[in-house]
Amino acid sequence: MTTLGSVLQSAEGLAEARQVQMVAARFSGGLLLGMNEQINCTACVSGFGSVGSMAAGAHGRYPLSERLTVLGGFSVGQSAEHGVVVKSSPVFALALRYDFVDWGPSRPFGEIGGYVAPLDQLRFTRVYANGAGLARGIGDTSGQSAAAFVRFGWLFRVSPINEFAVSGEVGRAAQRVRGYSEPLTQTNPFEATVRTGTDLMNYVKIGAQFTHLFGERIEVNVNGGVVRSFGTKDGLKLSVDGFGVLAPPPLKDLTWLEYGGRIGVRFSPHSILDVFLDATTGQKPLGSLIHGGVGLRYAF
């Protein structure tokens, strides 16, 4: 036995899991575009591995001119949080940054970019009361996600070893989840069929970062920001045996913090070992997501 209220609550939980996945995917794209690095520096490429969300990949930057730099990266990862398991997710990110370097140590900069995850392999869990405890409907599917953003900020090159920057960013993220059916089992007596749907989220972010060089070998970066989503829409529609077609209540917009840092140790003129830790913390259902790892960077 179950109730309409319990089934509707399970649909709401499923929609929230998809919302959390959009936030996590946007954050992963930011890491590939130098979230832990200073705004202005030489060409470099870095291979990395992280835990929290298991991922491995590479990212870097290359100056096309004195003012214009291209940034990009790719990773393959997996994660499990808030009712969604990402079994595999290849992510590709690209951005262009324009830095008015000839204006002097205090100057504006702008950036446009985004990411795409073209082939996510996903598993969603829907939890509801069945009269004898909690039932779990589990469904495997695939999906795609992408986001685009523009960012404007001001860079303060305080000294040759200190860089401080503040910025504002606005972006839009989308996530398409293919339809799937949960299997009917003894532990899932009211199975659901989920239709293909697209989730949308707009966001604004205000952030700051600081990079300092200790001596000639140790570089430290700290960064943080406040993000607010708006115009969030879920594309979830499902039918549950015995209850018909259901749609969850509209998703609430969220506010969360993004913060982290990196310590880089130069062990040769061109090679740096990076250790980084980054996190998001926000209101329910987001909670806290933590990523940490190491990278090997080569500066040209």
Image: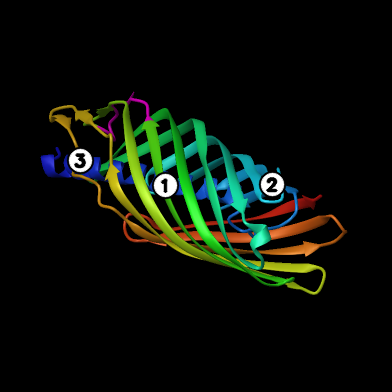
Q: Is residue 12 left or right of residue 220?
A: left
Give yes or no for residue 186 being in the magenta stretch: yes
**Residue denoted by label 2:** 61
**Residue at x-position 64% and y-position 45%:** 71
Closer to the camera: disc 3 or disc 1? 1
Q: Position of residue 159 (x, y in %)?
A: 71, 74
The answer to whether residue 271 of the structure is visible from this angle is yes
At horizontal 61% and vertical 58% (from top left) the residue drawn is 36
Q: Residue drawn 62% across and 57% down?
A: 100
Q: Nearer the viewer, residue 40 or 176?
A: 40
Identify the residue under disc 1.
171
Which sits in the foreground, 50 or 216? 216
Nearer the N terminus, badge 2 or badge 3? 2
Q: Magenta part of the protein: which range?
A: 177-188
Q: Residue at x 69, y 46 (%)?
A: 60
Of the numbered discs 3 and 1, the one sitting upstream in the chain is 1
User: Which of the 4 image quarters holds residue 99?
Assistant: bottom right
Position of 269 relative to 114 (above/below): below
Q: Amino acid at mark 3?
A: Pro
Q: Kindly identify which residue carries mark 3.
A: 248
* Amino acid carrying mark 2 in the image: Arg
Magenta-colored segment: predominant secondary structure: loop
How dense is the environment of label 2, judged by Cα within 10 Å: few (below 14), some, or many (20 and up)? many
Query: Where residue 3 appears, x then y in whole percent?
Result: 12, 41
Q: Position of residue 70 (x, y in %)?
A: 65, 43
